[in-house]
Structure formats: structure tokens, C-alpha cells
Image (cartoon, rainbow, N blue to C red):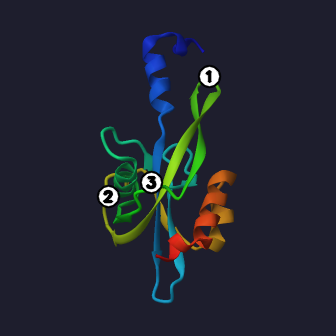
Amino acid sequence: MIWLANPHGLAKLAQMKKVQSAAIPYRLDETDQLSLLLVTSRRKGRWVLPKGTVSGMLPHASAAREAFEEAGVIGSIAETPFAKYHLRKKVGYGAAIEVPVHAFPMRVTVELPTWPEMNFRQRQWVSAAQIPEMVESAELRSLLQRFAQSDEARS
């Protein structure tokens, strides 16, 4: 991995290893049926949670910002994570690293018709029953299924 030998490559690797913040956007309908909002990843089009790192922001605020940018939703976000999971990120030449992600529940109150990344991502509301067929990552799938069964998903 030649690129790791130069300072720019090392800085990039350090940035990629930072803890990321994800929102778990959810809503309840009139009959208290839970829906979760997923977005597609930019590269592979996999169904994932909105996530990333916004420099200078608290983790939960960063998750809310990512939900706005990637999914076009606004809502009330928990200040403590519901759970943590790991994401495999490719770093070049076939290598990958594990990136920790803290996932914060976010009860959606506004769904915008346009949003910053709407030309790069799709968004879709799904039921808990749809999670196994849509979410490829076993760790994320398990987290979402646990969330769907939790008291936090009903508040």
C-alpha cells in the first residue's frame, strides 16, 4: 500500500478511522406502526443509514446533519446512541478498515421534498419486516431489528 507511506495517505487513513455518527430516522403512523428511513449509499447503492462525521459538531448533532443532507429529514434526535456498529471502508488496493459508527434514534417530524444529496441517493421508508431483505450488512440489520423492538422506537 504505497499511498499509506506518504503523509497525505496517513492523514486520509486517520480521517477515515474517526468514529462516525448515524441517524436512525423513524416515524410512527396513526396506529403506532413503525417505519424506518433508509438511504442508498453513493457508491454501491446499498440500503444504509444516513451517517458521516461533521467536524466541530457533537456526535448526535452530526447524525442529525447527515440525516438532513443525505435523506432530507428533520426531527428530534437522541443525545446518546442507541447502539454502535462497524462499517468496512475500502482504503485502496483492496484493503479495508473497520470504522466505528454510533447510531442515534431520530424521530422524523419533517420530510423535505428536496435536499442536498437528492441527486445522489434514494430514500425509502420501510417496515421492520422489510429490513432483512433490504439491508445487506448483518450487523446493521441486527441493530435495526433490535431498535424496531425497543421502547425507544415507540417514543
- Residue type marked 1: Tyr
Measured in 3D between alpha carbons, the distance from the residue under mark 1 to the one under mark 3, in whole angstroms, is 26 Å
Can residue 116 be seen at all in this image of the molecule?
yes
> How far separated are the C-alphas under marks 2 and 3?
10 Å
Q: In this figure, which residue is indicated by the disc labeled 2?
A: 115
Q: Is residue 135 left or right of residue 11?
A: right
Q: What secondary structure is found at the residue carrying circle 1?
A: loop
Name the residue tied to disc 3: 121
Q: Is residue 16 left or right of residue 64?
A: right
Could you tell me how far apart the alpha carbons at marks 1 and 2 are, in whole angstroms?
33 Å
Pinpoint residue 141: horizontal percent, then vertical percent. Answer: 65, 58
Q: Are marks 2 and 3 in contact (CB under 8 Å)?
A: no
Q: Earlier in the sequence, mark 1 or mark 3?
A: 1
- Amino acid type at image mark 3: Arg
* Image position, residue 143 (x, y; %): 62, 59
Tell me the tag on residue 93: 1
Percent x, y of residue 58 = 35, 46
The amino acid beneath tag 2 is Trp
